[in-house]
Image (tube, grey):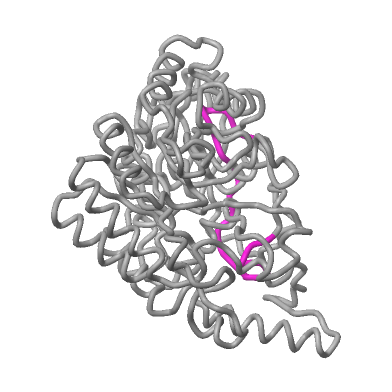
Amino acid sequence: MKTLLRGANVFIGGSFLRTNVLIEDGVIVSLSDSLSVVAEDPSICIVDYSGKYIFPGFVDVHVHFREPGFLYKEDIATGSKAAARGGYTHVFTMPNLNPVPDSIENMNEELKAIHEKAVVKVYPYASITKGEKGGELVCFEELMEYFELLGDNDEDLKGNVHGNVRLAGFSDDGVGVDASDFMLEAMQRIAGLGIISAHCEIKSILGGKNVHDGVLAKELGYKGISSESEWKMVERDLALSKETGCSYHVCHVSTKESVELIRKAKALGIDVTCETGPHYLLLSDEDVLVEVIREGKARENGEACLGADGYKIKYGIGRFKMNPPIRSNEDRKALVEGIKDGTIDMIATDHAPHSTEEKSKGFDGPMGVVGLETAFPVLYTGLVKNEVITLEKLVELMSISPAKRFGLEHGIEVGLPADLTVYDLESEYVIDPDTFASKGRFTPFEGRKVCGKCIATYVDGREVK
């Protein structure tokens, strides 16, 4: 079957060109402003996207789909549908599951769910330590060899949206690997073969468990979560990466110190990349404090707390609790500078849904918010329309750079899979979590007016419905 996506502004080679995209058998076969192909083959299905924007599908290297083990929070079906709704064609799932994918047997449970339910390309991480408990390393070599065999030989999975079997890398996301000797050995064994994506958090110097150690913690009377608990582990791991030559990726960078450490490491030639999240770029703990006070006053007066255009906020203050926490405005500014100068390579959502009951406990509830369906519009509205970065830079951060770092053959080029997303950048609306495909409802951007709506996502040339 042939499909022609006509008249859009298409992201090709780092810039936008008004052209047509011809797809055949899931692959891009032509990029041309000519419509002669339609005259030659009237059976072509034409979709008019005049005035819209076509991007290479977004790539999120950090999501939590909760399956197996926690399907009441999210599952592969709802998580991948949420991804498609946000324009993501590739997502990498973190291993804090039950069972943890720390062996071939346990990994197969997740792979089975991916094969049966995924509507986008889903690549799982294996854990670094058994059960993510920090006491015993997994058999890295066995897991990597297994995925190589699957990629070569599993015809049931190979080449379809549910398959494209590959191992994302290794991570103990949700906890840090405290033992330096364990991380050293892990890097020595993985060097040259894969990548470690590290959740950097030292429990012994964490401080609190609710919010950042700043103005919000002081106002609410909490012991705050220290910045040092993040950047100290980043500092350690960068030294180990330099020693071993292991490819190293830092998850959800949130502090100015981490940004500076990574900037210096890159200057030294250390093989490091990092990500940050939309909420760290757009919000500070001062902003959260304003919302806490505003919602408190609304409750006292028996009134609804309002967002943009009179939207009534439905979900509580737990929408601002995630790990790491939203930090100071000084940290936020450093992160913005990091994406502008290339220190921060990519933006990942850390999409981490929990049940409404759990998140309704506010800052005493679990850490994690949803982000797949809001990431592009909040970033486009907050950064591009405010001329902080260009649209081209945002596409690089959300698609091109993560794909390159994690070895995906991805982009809008003849011969590549038609993994694309289509956006109407003129569409303006207020974020309402009750419209989400995700089971999660708690987003820090509820009630915010944004521009940019995903109107279609194509995976291997097929529109995800």
Q: In this orientation, which residue lies closer to the viewer: 352 or 37?
A: 352
Magenta highlight on residue 457: yes
Q: In this orientation, which residue lies closer to the viewer: 202 or 283?
A: 202
Residue 7 position (above or below residue 156): below
State the residue lying farthest toward the right: 302
In the figure, is residue 405 to the left or right of 223? left
**Percent x, y of residue 122:** 53, 33
For the C terminus, which image quadrant? top right
Answer whether residue 74 is visible to the viewer in this image: yes
Q: Residue at x 52, y 76 (%)?
A: 224
| Quarter assignment of residue 186 | top left
| Quarter assignment of residue 451 | bottom right
Q: In this orientation, which residue lies closer to the viewer: 432 or 349?
A: 349
Magenta highlight on residue 335: no
Residue 55 position (above or below residue 459): below
**Percent x, y of residue 184:** 28, 43
Residue 261 position (above or below residue 413): below
Answer whether residue 54 is visible to the viewer in this image: no
The magenta-colored residue range is 442-465
Q: Residue at x 55, y 18 (%)?
A: 1
Q: Residue at x 52, y 78 (%)?
A: 285
Q: Residue at x 72, y 48 (%)?
A: 439
| Quarter assignment of residue 229 | bottom left
**Percent x, y of residue 216:** 56, 82
